[in-house]
Amino acid sequence: MEGEDIVASARSQARPVYLVDGARTPFIKARGKPGPFSPADLAVQCGRPLLMRQPFAADSFDQVVLGCGNQLAGEMNVARVAALRLGCGVRTPAWTVHRNCGSGMQAIDDAFRNIAHGDMDLVLAGGTESLSRAPLIVADDATEWLARLRSAKGAAARAAAFAQFELSFLSPEIALKQGLTDPVSGLTMGQTAEVLAHRFGISREEADAYAMESHHRLANAQKQGWLDDEIEPMFAPDGTLYDHDDGVRPESTPESLAKLRPVFEKYGDVTAGNASQVTDGACLTILASEAAVERHGLTPIARIVDSEWAALDPEVMGLGPVFASSQLMERAGLSLDDIDLWELNEAFAAQVLACLSALADDGFCREVLGRDGAVGRIDRDRLNVDGGAISLGHPVGTSGARIVLHLVNVLRRAGGKRGIATLCIGGGQGGAMLVEAL
C-alpha cells in the first residue's frame, strides 16, 4: 500500500479529525506517600501552557473529556473540575471516562468519534492520574465498629463500643492494590504477566533485557532533548520544579536487574525492575475538525484515522494489543510493512514480549485471531523508540493519551507517516489507535 493512500474503513469515510497540539506533564514516580499534585492539579498544570499558546479562547471547546482511573472524592468528575479551573467556561460540558489503562485513549476516541460524526468541532481530550494519592480502605469490620461507635447513645454505650476496638482496624489497605487485582479471575495484573511469560516462554533474562533497553532509550531521549517540546514543567506548592520523568534508571544493567526478587509469584519472573512504575502525570490533546482548523487558523500535526477496542480473557489481559491492533490493521487493509512506528504501552516487559511473540506466531494467529497466518514480527527498532512505561511510568488514566501524542511526535521527528498506539487494559481488553503524521 502506498504511503499516501487513505486507509479505507467506515470511520475514515467520515469527516477528517485532526490532532493539532498536545502536551503532558513530567511523570513523577510515587514514593510511598501522597505526591504534590492531585489529578485536577496535574491536568491544570499540563493544560494552562497548552491553552495559552492557542489562537482561540479556552471556552471555545465543544467538550472536555479526560480519562482517570483513580478519581478522588474531592474531585469527582475531575474533567469538569479541571475544565473550570482552566477557564473553559461554565457552559462547556466536561466528563470523565474510566476504562482502566485505556482511559486516556478512550477520551481521545470519544473526541475523535464526535468530531468525525459531525457532532463537535473542537475537543480537549486526554487523561490525568495521581496514583500516589490512592486512598486507604479500611476493612468492613472496622467500618462496622465505627458505625456502632457513632450510633452509641450515652457514655456506657460509647464505652462498650470503644471496648470492641481492635488494632487490626489501624491497618487499612491501599485502594490501588485492589484496583490492580482483577475481581473475576482473582489475579493481580502482575500475575497475568506471569501467565503470559509461561505461555510464550519469556525468560527472566529476556524481560530484564527489555526493561534495561527501555531505561536506556528514555535516558537517550532526555539527553537528546527529544521530549522537551512534549513536556510542560510543573511547580509544586512548595516551589519544587518538576521538569522530567524522574523514574528513569540509565544505570540499569542485566546484573542489577537480576538481583531484584519476583513480586507477584515466589518463583516468577516479574519484578519491580521489569514492570511499569506507579506514577503521577497528565496528558492533554486538542482535536479539531477541518472547519475548526480553518476557523481558528490551526496547523494540524496528525490525523486520527481509526481506532479499535477488543476484549479477551482477563487472565491474559496483556495480549489486548494483539487483538485490538490486528483487528484495526485488518479492517484498514494494512500489513506490518505499512506501519512505520509503534507505541505499545509497557505494562510489563514479559507482556510486551508476549505480544510480539503472539503476533509472529502462525498457530496463535490462526487459532485465536482467526487469521490466515501470522501478522508478522514487529521490528524492535520501530517499537517504543524512546522507552515506555517501564522507564517513565504508567499513570493509569493518562498512558493511553501519552502514547498517542508521543507516537505523533516521534513520527514527525523520524519522518514517518503512519503509526499505531496500543495498550492492554485490566479486566481483559485492548485498545489501538491508527494515526497519520502531517
Image (cartoon, grey):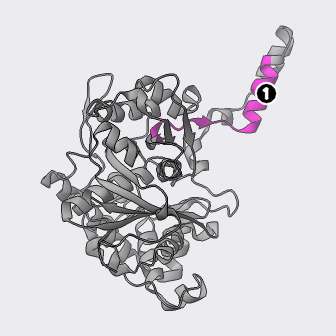
How many numbered marks, from 0 up?
1
Give the residue drawn at x 35%, y 76%. Answer: 206
Q: Is residue 146 magenta?
A: yes
Residue 45 in the image, given as x and y percentages of width and height: 34, 31
Q: Quadrant of residue 233?
A: top left
Depth check, front residue: 199 or 346: 346
Residue 360 in the image, given as x and y percentages of width and height: 43, 85
In the image, which residues are magenta? 129-150
**Residue at the disc numbered 1:** 164
Residue 2 in the image, given as x and y percentages of width and height: 30, 78
The answer to whether residue 432 shows anywhere in this view is: no
Graded by Cα atoms within 10 Å as few (under 14), some (14 to 19) or many (20 or more), the crowding at tag 1 reads: few
Is 291 left or right of 228, judged from the image as shown? right
Is 78 left or right of 148, judged from the image as shown? left
Q: Is residue 136 magenta?
A: yes
Q: Could you tell me the amino acid type at mark 1?
A: Gln
Classify 343 as above or below 359.
above
Depth check, front residue: 294 or 339: 294
Depth check, front residue: 33 or 436: 436
Residue 73 in the image, given as x and y percentages of width and height: 59, 29
Q: In which quarter of the image is the N terminus?
A: bottom left
Give the residue drawn at x 61%, y 49%. Answer: 178
Q: In which quarter of the image is residue 368?
A: bottom right
The answer to whether residue 5 shows anywhere in this view is: yes
Q: Quadrant of the C terminus?
A: bottom left
Depth check, front residue: 421 or 269: 421
Give the residue drawn at x 62%, y 60%. Answer: 427
Is 264 left or right of 240, judged from the image as shown? right
